[in-house]
């Protein structure tokens, strides 16, 4: 199966911003770009007669216009359009299972740094078995890397993280930018002392975390010698640490466990905070 980047189109400016971001990503990867528009009321193709009315005219036009606009910017990129006779959630989840990356547009409700996550977006992000990116209308145009450009990845220090780091290192290498690896850790209770915090405890916690972080990153430094990761341990809420670190980044990469307890939310607190508060495109990578 050929590598594919899929983007969901719904005719909104946000979905077109996502389409352009997805096109840039596909061009970097040398993948095919798949434009997908889901319409449950998709009609069978009409008999070719002059009097026949094509009930799918507007759906086809939406995809065709997006394809034309993208090909003007990326003439060498292979772009295919597709209409799915299904609801958006099911169509996108099916496409996501066959794509290296699925990209969706995200709508900010206000000028504050927040995402509007509808039921379709949330369902795809939370249930897809491959990476999904959410892109805001204000996502940075891609060209030569700007000063300070980077990929940021949120990293836990327990449990598997190969899928997450693989995506992050490849993204940084393809962009030619630095990779910032952020580990947030709330202060332990015994670090709090009367009148402040115990700096000896803080130093000990930080050193232990930094040592573990270096161990996790060592094989990835060898695998991607052209990417020099900058690691940081932040003694604050992991969610706050990640959102703060993503300021000015090109893209933020966070993880999501495929298997979570039955009564637990499908997204953990870090992914949830990233999707709602990060200004840059956010890629959610499912992992075991």
Image: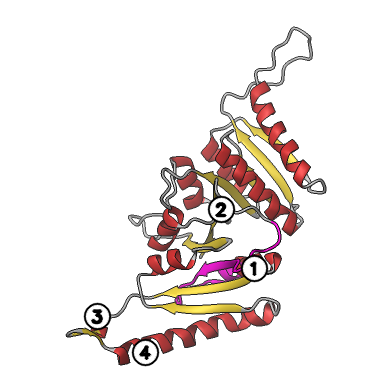
In the rendered image, residue 102 lying in the magenta stretch gets the answer no
**Residue 171, x across and y down, in percent:** 64, 65
The secondary structure type at the circle numbered 2 is strand
Pick whichever of labels 2 and 4 is earlier in the sequence.
Answer: 2
Determine which quarter of the picture holds residue 156.
bottom left
Q: Residues within 10 Å of mark 2 (few under 14, many from 20)?
A: many
Q: Nearer the viewer, mark 2 or mark 1?
A: 1
Label 4 sits on residue: 203
Q: Residue furthest bottom?
A: 200
The secondary structure type at the circle numbered 3 is helix
The secondary structure type at the circle numbered 1 is helix
Determine which quarter of the picture holds residue 241.
bottom left
- Residue depicted at x 56% and y 78%: 230
Label 1 sits on residue: 172
Pick whichever of labels 2 and 3 is earlier in the sequence.
Answer: 2
166 vs 106, nearest the viewer: 106
Spatial CA distance of label 2 from label 1 is 17 Å
Pick whichever of labels 4 and 3 is earlier in the sequence.
Answer: 3
């Amino acid at each position: 199966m050929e590598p594919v980047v899929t983007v969901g189109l719904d005719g909104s400016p946000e979905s077109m911003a996502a389409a352009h971001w997805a096109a840039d990503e596909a061009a970097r990867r040398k993948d095919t770009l798949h434009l997908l528009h889901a319409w449950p009321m998709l009609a069978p193709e009409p008999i070719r007669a002059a009097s026949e009315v094509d009930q799918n005219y507007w759906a086809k036009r939406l995809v065709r216009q997006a394809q034309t606009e993208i090909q003007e910017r990326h003439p060498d990129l292979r772009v295919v359009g597709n209409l799915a006779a299904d609801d958006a959630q099911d169509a996108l989840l099916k496409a996501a299972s066959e794509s290296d990356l699925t990209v969706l547009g995200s709508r900010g409700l206000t000028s504050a740094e927040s995402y509007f996550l509808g039921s379709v977006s949330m369902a795809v992000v939370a249930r897809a078995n491959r990476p999904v990116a959410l892109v805001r209308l204000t996502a940075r145009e891609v060209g030569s890397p700007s000063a300070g450009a980077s990929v940021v990845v949120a990293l836990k220090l327990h449990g598997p993280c190969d899928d997450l780091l693989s995506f992050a290192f490849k993204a940084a290498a393809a962009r030619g930018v630095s990779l910032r690896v952020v580990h947030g850790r709330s202060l332990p209770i015994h670090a709090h002392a009367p009148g402040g915090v115990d700096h000896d405890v803080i130093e000990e916690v930080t050193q232990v975390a930094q040592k573990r972080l270096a161990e996790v990153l060592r094989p990835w430094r060898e695998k991607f010698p052209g990417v020099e990761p900058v690691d940081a341990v932040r003694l604050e809420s992991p969610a706050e640490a990640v959102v703060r670190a993503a300021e000015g980044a090109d893209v933020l990469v966070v993880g999501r466990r495929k298997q979570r307890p039955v009564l637990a939310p499908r997204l953990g607190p870090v992914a949830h905070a990233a999707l709602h508060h990060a200004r840059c495109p956010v890629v959610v990578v499912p992992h075991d």
